[in-house]
Image: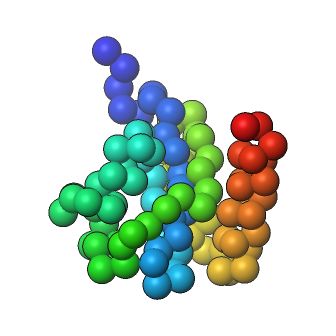
Amino acid sequence: MILDEQKPYTVYILHCSDGTLYTGVCIDPAKRLHAHNRLQSGAKYTRTRRPVSYGYQEICKNRSEAQKREHYVRTLPRLDKLQLCSQWKKVKRDHE
């Protein structure tokens, strides 16, 4: 059995329907997006800003690394976060 600390975690930025951004960490991005959009277990912040969609995702090797990266991303100015999203979408498009 792999401990949660040893599993890869994803740091993500969501685009909310009101134009705001939300940053978080999860193990399963598809499941977490579903929770943000459909379930009460999604973050309180996003419940009133649905639908939300991924703008950025970054895989980290463990929970500790992901939480440090999440903290860093949260402290970035909005324009820097939007630039991360733009770069991620370009790379994602290029690999499809």
Residue closest to the far top? 1
**x, y percent for residue 22:** 48, 70
Q: Which residue: 68% across, 63% down?
A: 85
Q: Is residue 18 above or below residue 54?
A: below
Q: Which residue: 78% across, 58% down?
A: 87
Residue closest to the far bottom? 18
In the image, taking residue 44 as reference, residue 85 lies left or right, namely right
Q: Quadrant of the C terminus?
A: top right
Viewer can see residue 69: no
**x, y percent for residue 60:** 58, 40
In the image, taking residue 23 as reference, residue 94 lies left or right, namely right
Viewer can see residue 44: yes
Question: In this view of the protein, which residue sits in the foreground, 22 or 60?
Answer: 22
In the image, taking residue 88 as reference, residue 73 lies left or right, namely left
Location of residue 17 by image quarter: bottom left
| Number of marks in the rendered image | 0
Q: Quadrant of the N terminus?
A: top left
Question: In this view of the protein, which residue sits in the foreground, 16 or 60?
Answer: 16
Location of residue 35 by image quarter: bottom left
